[in-house]
Image (cartoon, rainbow, N blue to C red):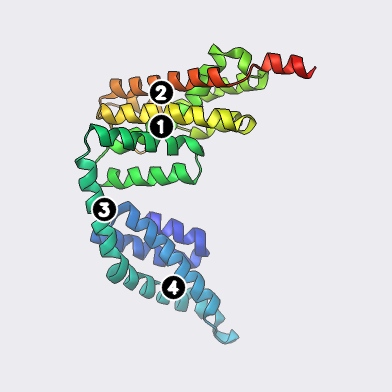
Amino acid sequence: PVIGAGIAFSIADRAGITAGLMCGWIAKDIGAGFLGGMIGGFLAGYVTVLLVRYIKVPKSIESIKAVLLVPVLSVGISGLIMWFVIGTPITMLLSALEGWLSGLNTENKILLGVITGCMMAFDMGGPLNKSIFAFSMIAFEAGNYVPFAAVMAGGVTPPLALALSTIIFRNKYTEEEREAGKAAWILGASNITEGAIPFAVGDPLRVIPCIMAGSAVSSTLSLVFDCACRVPHGGLWATLIPNVFDNPIQWVLAIACGTVAGAILLGVVKKSKVQTEVAGA
C-alpha cells in the first residue's frame, strides 16, 4: 500500500494519496504484489490528476472538491479499475513469472544473469537499473530471493571494478579519478551503483561496456551458484548479517570475478592519461 501511495503522491500530490493507498491495498489483497502496487499507484495518480483538471465546481464549494469530491471519486474509479480490470492479469503475470523463475535451468540462468548485470550497469541507477530492480522485487515478495542476489551483485560490481582498475592501471586515470576510486570502494560495497558515474561521464564509450561486462559476470555467477539474499539492499555489508544469504561465500566470489573482469577490461581499452597529457602539452 505504501508503494502505491508514494507513486500516486509523486504524480498528483496529496490528492492522490488516498487512492494510491486503496490501490495498494487491493493489489495486496488480490495477490498482485509489488508490481500491482506500482501499477496501482500510477493508476491512482493519473486518475486523480484528470479529476482535478476536468471537474469544474462553483468557487463557493471549491474547497469541498479538493478535500472530498476528488478523493472519493479517485478512490472509487481507480479502485474499481484495479479490482475488476487490471488486477487479475497482473496476478496471472506474476504467477507465470514465479513459475518461470522456479524452473530456471543453467542456460536460462546465464541469459538472465547477462541481462540483469547489463541492465544494472548500463545507466548506473537510471531507468533500466530500476526496472530490473523492480523485477527482482516481484520475485523477492513471492519468496524467491535468488534474482535479487543477482541484481545486487550486478549493482555492486561497477564501482568496485573501477576502484580496482584505478589501482592496477594507475596511468589510465587522472589524479581526480584515482581519488574518486577510493570512494568507489565504499560506494560499491554499499550497492550504490552511482559511484561509477564520475568515471562514465568522462569516458562513456569505454567505461560503460566494461562495467556492463563485469556486472554480467557477477550476476550470472550469482544465479549459477544459487545465491539468495533476504534483504532488499545492503551490498557486501549484508553478508555480515547471519542467515541473510544463501551461499554468501559464493556470492562474494561471484562479485570478485566480475570486479576483476571489469577492471582488466577497463585497463585494456582505456587510453593512458599520461601519454594523452604529454601529447596535449
Which of marks 4 and 3 precedes in the sequence? 4
Q: Residue at x 60, y 23 (%)?
A: 180
Q: Secondary structure under badge 2? A: helix
Cα gap from disc 3 to disc 2, whole angstroms: 30 Å
Q: Where in the figure is residue 272, as x and y percent of width and height?
A: 64, 16
Depth check: 10 or 212 in front? 212
Q: Are marks 1 and 2 in contact (CB under 8 Å)?
A: yes
Cα gap from disc 3 to disc 1, whole angstroms: 23 Å
Q: Is residue 261 visible?
A: yes
Which of marks 2 and 1 precedes in the sequence? 1
Depth check: 99 or 21 in front? 99
Residue 143: quarter of image: top left
Q: Where in the figure is residue 181, as x and y percent of width and height?
A: 57, 21
Mark number, residue 71: 4
Is disc 1 surrounded by few (<14), some (14 to 19) or many (20+) residues within 10 Å? many
**89 over 248 or under it: above or below:** below
Which of marks 2 and 3 precedes in the sequence? 3
Q: Secondary structure under badge 3? A: helix
Q: Where in the figure is residue 248, as x and y percent of width and height?
A: 29, 24
Mark number, residue 258: 2
Name the residue beneath numbered marker 3: 94
Which of marks 1 and 4 precedes in the sequence? 4
Cα gap from disc 4 to disc 1, whole angstroms: 41 Å
